[in-house]
Image (cartoon, helix red, strand yellow):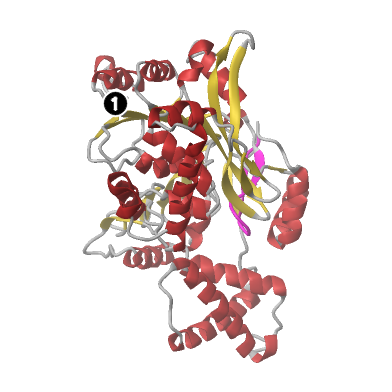
Amino acid sequence: MAERFSDNIEVAMERNPHLKRYVNEFVKRTGKFPEFYPQLSRSMKDIKYPNIIYPVGDPIFIHIYGDIHEERKYIVIEPRIANQQEEEKYEVIKDKLLEIAPTKRIPEDKEEFELFLDDLFNEALGKLSGGFLSRNRIQITREEAEKFRYLLKRDIVGIGPLEPLMRDPYIEDIHIIGANYISLIHKIFEALPTNITFGDNIRLADYFKNLSERIGRPVSDKNPVVDGTLPDGSRINIIYSPDVSIKGPSATIRKFSATPLSVTQLVNWNTFSAEIAAYLWLALEYGMSIFVCGETASGKTTTLNSIIPFIKPDAKVYTAEDTPEVIVPHKTWQRLTTRERGPEESRVTLFDLLKAALRSRPNYIIVGEIRGAEGAIAFQAMQTGHPVMSTFHAGDIKKMIQRFTGSPINVPVTFIDNLNIALFQQAVYVRGRFLRRVVSVVEIEGYYEELGGVATRNVFEWDPVSDRHIFRGMNNSYILERKIAEVAGYEDPKDIYNELFLRARIIKRMIELGIMDYHAVHREIKNFYERGIEGLSFRL
């Protein structure tokens, strides 16, 4: 189970008065103190009566609670308007903000727009009689100012009351059935009702109308059912009219991004460094097998998708998944998913798909997630010269090897070195922010009988204090020097590091030039494969 950080909740409560109030009231009502976890783990599925608070980025926290008397519930803890007096102050600020806005140039970029809103909010506060905001000259407190700032951003930049659910990486689906029943499917705690409410169906109808217009798919009584894509790539289906949706307007949101995040975006966010990206680029060019490992919602699939463009453009890529989430930009992409429904004889498992992959001669096999017996087939594929990429649930190299060599996967420990690289990623909570970081990249050198086990090397490590990735494998990388440099024909294997730093420079230059779009990044990589540095659209 994930480690409990009791000291972190004290820090979080001091920084977030609304969280402190909520926890104090909860303890007073139940006599129980919630446990605080910066990240969740799959092992929590077994907790019968959870009492867990976790952050999804200040000022939003989630409380999962259930006991013998109360069903499990998903409780959003966020700043909210407390009373009529606060409502009036908020409306005065909002009116002033809307009065000032038309005189300004409004930026299109989301991050710039957030900063623009901050400036606008500060200006509105300044203009409202030196801090006395309501008509009755009631002074605003610092807490109220931060609360109003959050709510304005939530409603204007985000998607209003549902924004906390969109920020939570542990949510798969959201179901809205009328104004007062919003439930979700949690990756760990499964189906949960929430404490979110829209008040009444008229407000909910207005909300859907505004949201559907924002995404360019307006709903109306004439056009009551629409499908669209939210700003983050999630899919939404809205059923608007009361004569169609009997319990009030309803919607289903499937959290999924149609266009993957690019490797430059992840490097820019410091999920991993440009050097790690360059290392993976070389590894994928030369057919190394790579597993992206970590706990639930650590961002494994996001990282996997971001590095797939590093595979040579003319490669045949074969993907096998339960749920289609892997995106491949290559022309020769054989995309297959399992069939779990229907008669037993007509079902198709991951095991079946991987067996078929061995017959279809792909250059790369990508498995969405290895969980069971299909893991043994993946290792067979590697052994017969088919490079494999996959995601896998394991927090470190020791646990990964234990899981692969144990039941139900049962890979002989002597076969483990068919896998070349394991990358480990975590969701971490740093200074009030929920972040994802690659914490280590490990090379698997081989099984040595005299060691009685598998020899591994840490080539990259994340330092939490400086939030930097340290290249431990400089002049000491088994994969670069022994696996890649030899095949690439380097007389001196150490020269491979110059190539790594060149590619790291290409990635950094793309970030400097704002080349962040997944397809634009893929184009540059493709051009580099075809014509080297001359093929890039920019100078280094």
- Where's residue 501, x and y in %? 50, 46
The residue at which mark 1 appears reads as 339
Left or right, 233 with respect to 313, comes to right
Which quarter of the rendering shows the C terminus? bottom left
Spot the residue most to the front. 491
Provide the residue span drawn in magenta.
51-67
Name the residue at 36% across, 61% down: 538
Instruction: Say which element carries label 1.
Output: loop
Name the residue at 47% across, 72% down: 113
Spot the residue most to the top. 449
Query: Is 119 drawn above or below residue 347 in the view shown?
Result: below
Q: Is residue 56 magenta?
A: yes
Left or right, 179 with respect to 151, comes to left
- Where's residue 183, x and y in %? 47, 47
Name the residue at 73% across, 60% down: 15
Q: Is residue 479 magenta?
A: no
Residue situated in front as seen by the camera: 190 or 505? 505
